[in-house]
């Protein structure tokens, strides 16, 4: 006879008792490998330790237990030798011995429910094909690094004087790669073109003194960003007085911020705003300020918010050419959206002092975090050597802000005409592109933090 306390795993057939009167556990016979589920009353006098096992649950308040066995044909024989053979092998059946109390019956039912498999608790997971079948791979493993032979890969034509000469004379068989300058330029392109996440980024350009080159720096920064990036960049002239930002790109749409304020509620797509902005050859979009000084004075923080809401919907980077000073109403709306700020300082004692005082005002009015990540641009607007020591000036601002960039003098800019980015001196373009890379890196760091 099999041990009555074996732990079954399959329930293929069951034995059913027609009556439970006077049955003891020694009167149950089970043969051949099916499953019998029997609830029996514990006879008096048995040693409790003998009955404890993995499949027998004892409780001081219960008089009924379940016993599960694996057999092929379940035969239950009572004391009189009566054969109670399983009549239905389709599923498990039970013989229930009347419980001593309602609480005991409820406990048995609860135990049975706990043992029943629950398909609703099964969680399906999506897995790669290789996890299911050994030796099979999913398509994402077919990478270029794996499949392309480096010896036969087509390399781009090298940039650089003698590198390109060797490439040409060898019939395009010897490719030494780019020269030093070309590698540096492409590395700067990658820094500027790095992706920005989390919605539009607002970068205002500030100064407390006119004539230090705030509009020039806004234009150069916008052109350097738009020339290297794939997303959209816009510069907004938010000067309450008449600004000249649109005049620096040489193309005008004839529209101003006032037109966008009036039409902002009706803008449905980019075509609606493209009729208002002017676009530079680098793909920098510009919104001009009002040309009528009387109307310009009415440009308020609410007007700026209306323009900024539209710009944020269609552009990744929004530069703001602010007015002179930092206490007018538009400045409050500008700083509330700023992710990074740029402060322009001229190379004179009073211009440098005003720029430093601007940082102090910002720190004292709740913008200390912006000051720590700010960029100060030391703009050289006059030819020749500056009267102040630029190294000392740079050392001062490095103690207060994140980065300092020097913008060299450029006769093309000093002429006051429209700026053509490709016509700038190489040093000026390099400084503008370095400023753009620093701004992008600062925005990315703030997004992570």
Image (cartoon, rainbow, N blue to C red):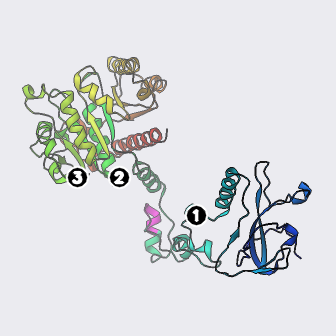
Task: Report the side of 266 relative to 127 (left or right).
Answer: left
Observer able to see residue 75: yes
Q: Which residue shows up at 80% across the image and 68% down it? A: 7
Gap between marks 2 and 1 measured at Cα: 51 Å
Gap between marks 3 and 1 measured at Cα: 59 Å
Quarter occupied by residue 106 = bottom right
Between residues 176 and 102, which one lies in front from this camera angle? 102
Gap between marks 2 and 3 measured at Cα: 12 Å
Between residues 381 and 114, which one lies in front from this camera angle? 114
- State which quarter of the image contains the N terminus: bottom right
Q: Main secondary structure of the magenta part?
A: helix
Disc nearest the viewer among 2 and 1: 1
Is 222 in the magenta?
no
Residue on which disc 2 sits: 228
Task: Give the class, few, some or many, for how many residues have Cα within 10 Å of label 1's Cα (few <14, many ≥20).
Answer: few
Circle 2 — which element?
helix
Residue on which disc 3 sits: 281
Between residues 280 and 131, which one lies in front from this camera angle? 131
Observer able to see residue 380: no
Q: Which mark is residue 122?
A: 1
Quarter occupied by residue 317 = top left
Q: Which residues are magenta?
A: 158-165
- The earlier-in-sequence mark between 3 and 1 is 1
Q: Which residue shows up at 35% across the image and 35% down it? A: 407
Task: Give the class, few, some or many, for how many residues have Cα within 10 Å of label 3's Cα (few <14, many ≥20).
Answer: some
- The earlier-in-sequence mark between 2 and 3 is 2
Task: Report the side of 376 relative to 239 (left or right).
Answer: right
């Amino acid at each position: 006879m099999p041990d009555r306390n074996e732990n079954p795993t399959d329930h293929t057939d069951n034995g059913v008792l027609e009556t439970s009167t006077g049955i003891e556990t020694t009167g149950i016979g089970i043969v051949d490998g099916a499953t019998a589920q029997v609830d029996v009353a514990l006879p008096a006098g048995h040693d409790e330790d003998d009955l404890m096992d993995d499949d027998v649950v004892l409780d001081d308040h219960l008089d009924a237990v379940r016993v599960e066995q694996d057999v092929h044909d379940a035969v239950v024989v009572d004391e009189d030798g009566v054969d109670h053979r399983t009549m239905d092998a389709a599923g498990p059946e039970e013989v229930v011995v009347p419980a001593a109390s309602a609480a005991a019956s409820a406990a048995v039912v609860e135990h049975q429910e706990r043992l029943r498999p629950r398909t609703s608790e099964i969680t399906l997971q999506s897995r790669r094909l290789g996890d299911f079948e050994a030796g099979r791979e999913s398509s994402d493993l077919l990478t270029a690094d794996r499949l392309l032979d480096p010896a036969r890969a087509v390399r781009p034509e090298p940039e650089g004087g003698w590198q390109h000469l060797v490439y040409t004379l060898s019939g395009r068989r010897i490719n030494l790669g780019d020269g030093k300058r070309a590698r540096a330029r492409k590395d700067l392109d990658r820094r500027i073109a790095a992706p920005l996440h989390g919605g539009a980024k607002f970068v205002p350009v500030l100064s407390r003194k006119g004539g230090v080159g705030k509009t020039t720096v806004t234009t150069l920064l916008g052109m350097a960003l738009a020339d290297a990036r794939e997303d959209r960049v816009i510069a907004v002239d938010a000067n309450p007085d008449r600004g000249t930002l649109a005049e620096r790109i040489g193309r005008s749409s004839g529209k101003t911020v006032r037109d966008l304020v009036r039409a902002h509620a009706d803008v449905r797509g980019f075509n609606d705003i493209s009729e208002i902005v002017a676009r530079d050859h680098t793909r920098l979009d510009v919104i001009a300020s009002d040309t009528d000084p009387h109307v310009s004075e009415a440009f308020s923080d609410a007007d700026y918010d209306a323009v900024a809401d539209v710009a944020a919907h269609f552009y990744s980077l929004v530069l703001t050419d602010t007015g002179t000073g930092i206490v007018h109403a538009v400045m409050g709306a500008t700083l509330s959206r700023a992710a990074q700020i740029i402060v322009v300082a001229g190379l004179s004692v009073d211009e440098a002092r005003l720029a430093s005082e601007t940082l102090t005002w910002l720190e004292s009015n709740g913008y200390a975090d912006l000051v720590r990540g700010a960029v100060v641009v030391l703009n050289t607007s006059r030819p020749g050597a500056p009267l102040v020591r630029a190294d000392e000036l740079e050392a001062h601002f490095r103690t207060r802000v994140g980065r300092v960039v020097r913008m060299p003098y450029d006769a093309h800019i000093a002429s006051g005409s429209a700026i053509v980015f490709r016509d700038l001196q190489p040093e000026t373009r390099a400084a503008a592109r370095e400023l753009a890379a620093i701004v992008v890196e600062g925005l990315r760091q703030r997004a992570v933090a």
